[in-house]
C-alpha cells in the first residue's frame, strides 16, 4: 500500500504537545517596543507546533465565483489560513474551468496555480492526461468543498409542459422538439464530462430522454447560456447558485429541480492540488486542510450566513449583489412553473456535515460514482477502461489519509468518518449505487453507452 510510505510525516501526539510547550516557554519575556512586530509573528506561530509548521506560507489556489468556493474565500478572509501558518495564500479567480485546468497545468511557478476548486473528476482526468492533451498532471484530491447548490434550469418558453424533476411526462415534448422547431432541444453545462454534465444527463435519462441522441448538450459559458435562454436559442442549463435564483427571479426561466432533489447530499466540488506541490509541502497541505475545515464549520453555522454572503458577494470575489445569495444560503428556492418552492437550509449549500455523513471528507466511494458514471456514458474513448482501472486511479489521486491526519491534528477527530465509503447511495428515481457493486448500478440503468 503506497499510503504507508507517505506516512513518514506522522508524529506522535506526545512529541507535538512537547513542542508546543517548549515554544510557549519562549514567550516568557515580554516583547520590547523595538521588536514588537517580530514578537507578534512569533506569538501567532507559537500556536503551531514545530512538527506542524508549514514548509511554505505560500500557495496559489484557483476558484470559480460560485457557492462551491466559499470555504476557500472564508479561510482567507476570516484568517483561518493565517492561523495555521499559511499567511500568503493567493485565492485566485479563474475565468472558466478550462482556464483553471490550463493554469494548474503550468503551476504557480509558471504564473498559474498550484490547485484549488474542481468539478469531478477533473483531478483524476488531469492526472491521467485525459483533459490536458496527454500531458499527465498528477493531482491529489484533498477535501470536498460542498454539497448541493446546483440545479437544472429551463427556459421560460417551456413553462406548463411538465418539465419537472420527473421529466417522463414531458419526454415526448422534448424528443419531438426538432419536428416542430427545426432544431433539437438544446442544453448547456460549463465543462464536459464533469458534475454539471452528469447532473443533467442523470435527470434526462431517468425520464427516458437520451442526452446524446434526443437533445443537443454542449459546454457554453454561463452568461452566454442565460442570454440564449432569454432570446429562445437555449432551452436548459445545468447550473449552480447563484444562477438558479437569477434565472427564476429575472423570469428567464424556471427550475426543473435542484440537485438536492436529484440526489440528496450528493458529492459536488472538491479541493485538489498538484501532487508535486503536496509531496514537497505535506505540512503546508495539512495546514491548508485545517484552515478549510475550520472555514467549512464556520460556513455551516446559520448565524454566520449573513456575514458569509457579505464576504463572498464582495467586489474582490463574486462581485454580485448580496441579495442574490441570501435565498440560496437560507435554502430558499423559488422553482417557478407552478412548482412548490423549497425552504429548508439543508436543501441549500452545506460545507462540513450533512444528515448522513461528512461533507468535507473525500469519500473514495464518491470518486467511484463519478468514474462509474463516466463509464456509463462512454466518456474518454476507453482511456478509463473499467471499474478496476477506475479504482486504481482513485487510489493514486484520493488522499483521504491526509484529510484524516489534518482533522486529527486540528482536533476534529469526532468528525472523522469510520469508512472511506459512505455506503449505498440513493437517487430520486429509486436507483441505487452500491460502491461495493458498481456493475449492478450500471446494469440497472436503461440509458447508457456502456
Ligand atoms: Ca457545481
Image (tube, rainbow, N blue to C red):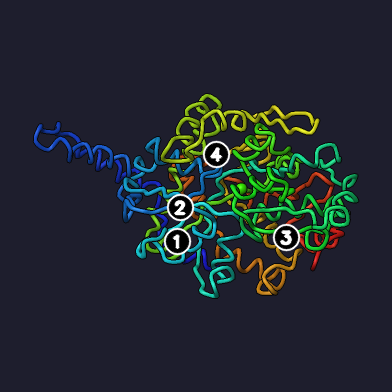
Query: Image point 63% across, 55% down: which residue?
Result: 220
How busy is the neighbourhood of tag 3: few (under 14 within 10 Å), some, or many (20 plus)? many
Of 213 and 10, the residue lying toward us: 213
Q: Which label lies toward us, 4 or 2?
A: 2
Assess disc 1: are there few (<14), some (14-19) or many (≥20) residues with their C-alpha within 10 Å of its C-alpha: some
Mark 2 residue element: strand
Q: Is ligand 1 within 8 Å of the beta carbon of the residue shown at mark 4?
A: no
- Which is more N-terminal, label 2 or label 4? 2
User: What mark, if any, has residue 383 been given in the picture?
Assistant: none
Label 4 to label 2, Cα distance in Å? 30 Å
The tag earlier along the polypeptide, 3 or 4, is 3
Q: Does residue 222 sit above or below 214 in this rendering?
A: above
Secondary element type, mark 1: helix
Mark 2 in CB contact with mark 1 (< 8 angstroms):
yes
Q: Which mark is residue 414?
A: 4
Q: CA distance from mark 1 to mark 4?
A: 36 Å
- Considering only order in the chain, which callout, 2 or 3, is on the residue closer to the N terminus? 2
Examine the image and state in which quarter residue 191 appears.
Answer: bottom right
The span from disc 3 to disc 1 (Cα, nearest Å) is 26 Å
- Residue 385 in view here: yes
Q: How many marks?
A: 4
Q: Which residue is mark 3?
A: 373
Image location of residue 47, percent across then percent down: 32, 39
Mark 3 and 1 residues: CB-CB less than 8 Å, in contact?
A: no
Most foreground residue, 270 or 134 = 134
Image quarter where the C terminus lies is bottom right
The vertical placement of 224 against 129, above or below, is above
Residue 179 locus on image (x, y percent): 88, 56
Residue 15 visible (yes or no): no
Q: What residue sits right under mark 2 in the picture?
A: 62
Amino acid at each position: 500500500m503506497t499510503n504507508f510510505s507517505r506516512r513518514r510525516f506522522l508524529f506522535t501526539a506526545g512529541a507535538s504537545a512537547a513542542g508546543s510547550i517548549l515554544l510557549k516557554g519562549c514567550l516568557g519575556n515580554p516583547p520590547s517596543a523595538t521588536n514588537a512586530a517580530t514578537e507578534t509573528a512569533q506569538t501567532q506561530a507559537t500556536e503551531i507546533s514545530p512538527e506542524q509548521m508549514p514548509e511554505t506560507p505560500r500557495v496559489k489556489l484557483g476558484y470559480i465565483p460560485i457557492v462551491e468556493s466559499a470555504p476557500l474565500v472564508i479561510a482567507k478572509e476570516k484568517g483561518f489560513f493565517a492561523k495555521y501558518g499559511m499567511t500568503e495564500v493567493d485565492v485566485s479567480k479563474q475565468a472558466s474551468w478550462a482556464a483553471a485546468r490550463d493554469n494548474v497545468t503550468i503551476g504557480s511557478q509558471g504564473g498559474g496555480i498550484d490547485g484549488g476548486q474542481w468539478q469531478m473528476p477533473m483531478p483524476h482526468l488531469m492526472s491521467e492526461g485525459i483533459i490536458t492533451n496527454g500531458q499527465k498532471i498528477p493531482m491529489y484530491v484533498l477535501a470536498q468543498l460542498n454539497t448541493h447548490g446546483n440545479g437544472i434550469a429551463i427556459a421560460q418558453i417551456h413553462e406548463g409542459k411538465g418539465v419537472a424533476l420527473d421529466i417522463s411526462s414531458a419526454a415526448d415534448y422534448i424528443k419531438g422538439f426538432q419536428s416542430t422547431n427545426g432544431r433539437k432541444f438544446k442544453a448547456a453545462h460549463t465543462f464536459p464530462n464533469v458534475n454539471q454534465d452528469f447532473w443533467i444527463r442523470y435527470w434526462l435519462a431517468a425520464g427516458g430522454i437520451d442526452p446524446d441522441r434526443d437533445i443537443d448538450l454542449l459546454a457554453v459559458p454561463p452568461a452566454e447560456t442565460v442570454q440564449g435562454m432569454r432570446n429562445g436559442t437555449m432551452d436548459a442549463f445545468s447550473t449552480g447558485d447563484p444562477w438558479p435564483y437569477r434565472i427564476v427571479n429575472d423570469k428567464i426561466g424556471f427550475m426543473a429541480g435542484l440537485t438536492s432533489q436529484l440526489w440528496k447530499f450528493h458529492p459536488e466540488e472538491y479541493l485538489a492540488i498538484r501532487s508535486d506541490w503536496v509531496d514537497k509541502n505535506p505540512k503546508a497541505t495539512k495546514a491548508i486542510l485545517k484552515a478549510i475545515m475550520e472555514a467549512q464549520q464556520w460556513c455551516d453555522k446559520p448565524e454566520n450566513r449573513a456575514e458569509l454572503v457579505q464576504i463572498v458577494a464582495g467586489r474582490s470575489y463574486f462581485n454580485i449583489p448580496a441579495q442574490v445569495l441570501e435565498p440560496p444560503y437560507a435554502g430558499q428556492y423559488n422553482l417557478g412553473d407552478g412548482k412548490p418552492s423549497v425552504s429548508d437550509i439543508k436543501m441549500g449549500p452545506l460545507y462540513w456535515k450533512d444528515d448522513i455523513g461528512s461533507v468535507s471528507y473525500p469519500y473514495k466511494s464518491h470518486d467511484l460514482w463519478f468514474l462509474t458514471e463516466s463509464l456509463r456514458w462512454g466518456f474518454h474513448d476507453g482511456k478509463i477502461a473499467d471499474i478496476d482501472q477506475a479504482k486504481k486511479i482513485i487510489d493514486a489521486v484520493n488522499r483521504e489519509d491526509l484529510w484524516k491526519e489534518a482533522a486529527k491534528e486540528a482536533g476534529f477527530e469526532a468528525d472523522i468518518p469510520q469508512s472511506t465509503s459512505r455506503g449505498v447511495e440513493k437517487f430520486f428515481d429509486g436507483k441505487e449505487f452500491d460502491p461495493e457493486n458498481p456493475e449492478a448500478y450500471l446494469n440497472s440503468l436503461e440509458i447508457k453507452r456502456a
